[in-house]
Image: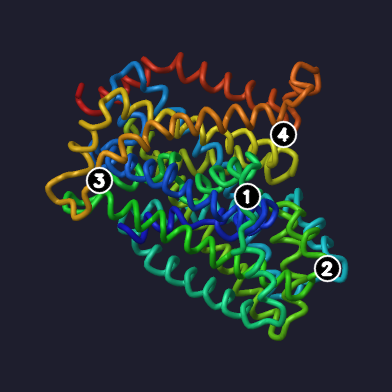
Amino acid sequence: MLLAMLGMAIGTGNIWRFPRIAASNGGGSFLVAWAVFLLLWSIPLLILEFGMGKGTRRGTVGSFIKTIGPKFAWMGAWVAWVAVAIMFYYSVVMGWTIRFFIATLSGEIPTAVPDQFWGAFNSTPQAVIFHAIAVGLGVFVVAKGVRGIETAARFLIPSLIILVVVLAVKALTMPGASAGLAFLFTPDFSELGNVRIWLEALTQNAWDTGAGWGLVLSYAVYMRAREDTALNAFVIGFGNNSMSLLAGIMVLCTIFSVMPQAANEIVGAGNEGLTFIWVPQLFAQIPAGQFFMALFFLALVFAAWSSLVAMIELASRILIDLGLTRRHAIAAVGSAGFLFGIPSALQIGVFQNQDWVWGVGLMLSGFFFAFAVLKYGVTKWRETFINTPDSDVRIGAWWDWAVRLVMVEAVVLMVWWLWQAGGEDFWSAETWTLVSSYNVGSVLIQWAVVLLALFALNGWMVRRIQAARGGG
């Protein structure tokens, strides 16, 4: 089970997102803030989710009902919805990784013009086909049940770790790699006065570890009573961030070795640009580059697959709690995942919009988790659900304060993101355009629609869950 949950945490956020975010936010300075938020955001929420899933044996909606009462079912539904909304476009990313892995084997990349292959593939019907393949692979593993997830994880996670380690070692042996290491691990403490670095560090930690998504909670439902809650949380948190560091070494050492003069331009090209446009160009300039590039994209396939499985499992768990059979729940999630992912596959602007809206939504999810535990009684929660008789690692009162701090962090982060998006033109018509990729209006409008719908459906969800459990 630990391997399955580690597979959930290790995803494209580590390999696809972390190197760019670290590079564009000062390298070593970013790592300082990133390490702080591992302890102050990710670890407390991971412990919380482990305890909630293991203690309630329900999905996010049922867990909130059992923890703080039926009036708050909508909060659990929000947590689930955000993860599902991310799943709709995450499968598109996995489709990209599959296509680029195939392209490395066939010799279609790299191309003479860096973005030629990406431009010809992205936002086309071909992208929809690979999106469908990704959904199918995720559904296949989840349909096998927990045994299927663990079986896949036994192969996927060790393979992913080996691939990333091999690539990181290769990057370290390249001439000029020391410049990349120096950039990544030498902090400029004066930059820590820039709130944006702290904002990006917290956001990246949420993306990296899956803390606050409800994914850990869904897997913890199946934990054995003797499995240690806190120990698993620490292993996932630190194991995941170790993978991020390896990915950062792999990418940044390669960039500073092969293209030192253009390094800043490359890492600032955006998520899609860094991995799908520039990495093929980087590997084309090193010995055995085609082979190592194939390993790189294969690692991305594995990372995306393991995380997508976790998202499908979470959504299926909710439908099971609402009364569907497991088979029908998985079929419904797979069908919805394919249909609602098509717009993101066909239009990069839709993809960017959804990534922005529901990425910020993860912060509200973390806020709701912390609110639930504080309302229940944070010390009582710790002694009841975390420090159980089977626990090898006992958590002290520091965690009680860390949960309170999570709420503060979530509020500060969301206010900062909204202010950053709106700026001085907050009340302009352009700010409130729904179709924009990054504006504040798109976030608030989509949030409001979902929150109002979930609040209106609160009573129905409670009745369905109670009926499915025989009124319990």
**Mark before the other along the chain sequence, 4 or 2:** 2
340 or 190: nearer the eye? 190
Q: Secondary structure at mark 2?
A: helix
To which quarter of the image does residue 113 belong?
bottom right
- Residues at badges 2 and 1 in contact (C-beta under 8 Å)? no
232 or 8: nearer the eye? 232
- Is 179 positioned to the left or the right of 233 in the image? right
- Residue 316 rendering spot, x and y as whole percentages: 40, 40
Can residue 78 be spotted in the picture? yes
Dot 1 corresponds to which residue?
92
Badge number at residue 395: 3
- The vertical placement of 16 against 407, above or below, is below
- Taking the spot 54% from the left edge, 67% from the top edge, the residue there is 246
Dot 2 corresponds to which residue?
261
Q: CA distance from mark 1 to mark 3?
A: 39 Å
- Residue 49 rendering spot, x and y as whole percentages: 34, 41
363 or 131: nearer the eye? 363
Q: Secondary structure at mark 1?
A: helix
Residue type marked 2: Gln
